[in-house]
Structures are given as C-alpha cells and as structure tokens.
Image (cartoon, helix red, strand yellow):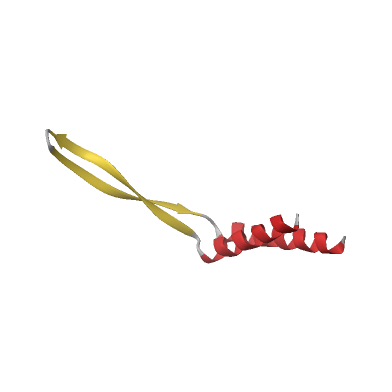
C-alpha cells in the first residue's frame, strides 16, 4: 500500500503541474491517384488540477496509514 501511495502522490503532483497534453493525428482529405492531401489535427486531452490534488491527498493518506501500523 505504501508503494501505491507514493505512485498516487507522484501522479497527483504531475497532474497538478501539467493540466493536459495534445496529440496529433493525420487525416486524409483528398486522394486522387498518386496525389494525397492530408491534414494534421491536434487533439487536446485536459483534466482539472483538482483531480491531481485529490490523487495527491489520497496518496498522502495511504502513506500515513501505512506508517501508523
């Protein structure tokens, strides 16, 4: 449980610092014989920093409960 707590603390801290990321996909627009026109599209993935805080707090609670035993 202590390892899980440390993992949650690390993930929570990262989620509070970085609130999202983008990934790029390529879409075909037109394909006429050997000629191909494509477009890169950015797809954002965002989350609330509050979620990172909840994970951070949960990890701290797991670590502290394991230390008391």
Residue at horizontal 55 percent and vertical 60 percent from the top: 15
The residue at 39%/52% (across/down) is: 23
The front one of 43 and 2 is: 2
For image coordinates 71% across by 57% down, the residue present is: 3
- In the image, residue 28 sits, relative to residue 17, either above or below, namely above
Which image quarter is the C terminus in?
bottom right
> Does 41 sit left or right of 57 as displayed?
left
Instruction: Please identify the quadrant where the N terminus is shown.
Output: bottom right
Q: Nearer the viewer, residue 10 or 20?
A: 10
- Total tally of numbered discs in the picture: 0
Please state if 67 lies on the left or on the right of 32 as rendered.
right
Extreme residue toward the front, this view:
3
> Height in image: 25 above or below 46?
above
Residue furthest to the top: 33
Residue 64 place in picture, x, y as percent:
79, 63
Based on the displayed image, in which of its 4 quarters is residue 32 positioned? top left
Residue that protrudes farthest toward the right in the picture: 69
The relative height of residue 28 versus residue 8 in the rendered view (above or below) is above
Question: Quick check: 31 left or right of 21?
Answer: left
Q: Is residue 54 left or right of residue 68?
A: left
């Amino acid at each position: 449980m202590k390892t899980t707590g440390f993992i949650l603390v690390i993930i929570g801290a990262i989620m509070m610092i970085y609130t999202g990321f983008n990934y790029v996909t390529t879409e075909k627009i037109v394909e006429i014989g050997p000629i191909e026109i494509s477009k890169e599209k950015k797809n954002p993935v965002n989350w609330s920093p509050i979620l990172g805080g909840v994970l951070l707090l949960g990890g701290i609670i797991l670590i502290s409960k394991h230390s008391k035993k």
